[in-house]
Amino acid sequence: MTGDGPGVTLAESGEFAVIDRLVAGRRQPPWVPLGPGDDAAVIACPDGRTVVSTDMLVEDRHFRLDWSSPHDVGRKAIAQNAADIEAMGGRATAFVVGFAAPGHTITAHAVDLADGMWHEADLMGAGIVGGDLVSGPQWVVSVTALGDLGGRTPVRRNGARPGDVVALIGDLGRSHAGYELWRNGIEQFDELRRRHLVPHPPYGQGEVAARTGATSMTDVSDGLLADLGHIASASEVSVDVSLDLLAADLDAVAAAGAVVNADVRQWVLGGGEDHALVATFPTDPPPGWRRIGRVLDHPGSQPRVTVDRVPWHGTAGWESFRVD
């Protein structure tokens, strides 16, 4: 058997035939004069600098193929890397992908994975310019994202100052809510279940924040409090978050929380993988962003991040080597 018809595996198709199928007919953006097919790709960098980030998804740790379609996994892999570029105030321009899978993997599933990646990359006008395909004991998807700053200074984590407004764009708690619904076998709240499989980063808003004077920024990948903790530590400040200002997020997951008997504050404050953007601004945030707190001076004996001015005693966010 050859090709990627029903039942044909990667081992049966062969590495180079699969690669040819994955790259055939793809359109690259104008800043990619040379895409896949040679020893390396060529990408134009008009700014003279390139923003680079990389991340990995490991089967049964970051996704489950009995929950997610290969298309979903592809979208998630691109989205979470693009969000890191957004968090620097940049725009994702290109992605390089490494994919490991067992030889018995159905070739059509690898094609669906690539289609999902291209679907997500198209949302921001970016291209997938190269990568690697290898045999491995389980699916591992490794993505390197490249981005452009458009001549702007990168927005780092270390610029927050006392008095700054903490603002957010995007949603919180949806991915964790979806995870709990999947984990408990609850076939309700389809939108929340989908949001765990495919995040919705606010593409383009990192650039908006940079243009309007954001002093620091990050994406909410590990959990709001954990990621604000990175900003607070790097900036040597404290951050206080208001639950009242997060009421829309709490309300959005309240019904799901009641079904699984969960404290939805934990989902909103400590749940990750929504890939919203959170930033600090010296004045009012740009349209579409919402205030959620304030940057304060940091007395050395106090926690870096508080909720309504008191320490939060729940989980602040995801840790890669935590044993669940």
Image (cartoon, helix red, strand yellow):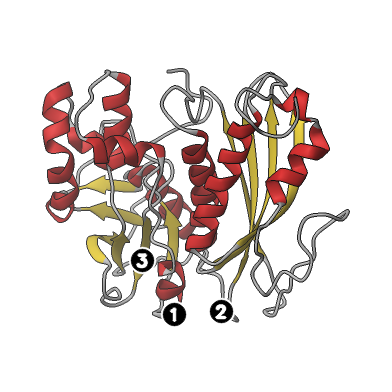
**Kind of residue sitting beneath label 3:** Thr
Secondary element type, mark 3: strand
Q: Which of marks 2 and 3 is nearer the N terminus?
A: 2
Point 18% across, 26% down: residue? 262
Which percent across, then down, holds residue 103?
Answer: 72, 21
- Which numbered tag is attached to residue 280? 3
- The reply, left or right, for residue 109 in relation to residue 49 is left
**Kind of residue sitting beneath label 2:** Arg
**Residue picked out by circle 2:** 152
The residues bearing labels 2 and 3 have C-alpha atoms spaced at a distance of 17 Å
Label 2 crowd bin: few (<14), some (14–19), many (20+), radius 10 Å: few
- The reply, left or right, for residue 82 in relation to residue 287 is right
135 vs 45: above or below: above
- The reply, left or right, for residue 116 in relation to residue 267 is right
Q: Do the residues labelled 2 and 3 touch (CB within 8 Å)?
A: no
Which percent across, then down, holds residue 229?
Answer: 40, 47
Q: In which quarter of the image is the C terminus?
A: top left
Q: Which of marks 1 and 3 is in front?
A: 1
273 or 240, which is in the foreground? 273
Which percent across, then down, holds residue 148?
Answer: 61, 71
The residues bearing labels 2 and 1 have C-alpha atoms spaced at a distance of 8 Å
Q: Which of marks 2 and 3 is in front?
A: 2
Q: Are marks 2 and 1 in contact (CB under 8 Å)?
A: yes
Q: Which of marks 1 and 3 is nearer the N terminus?
A: 1
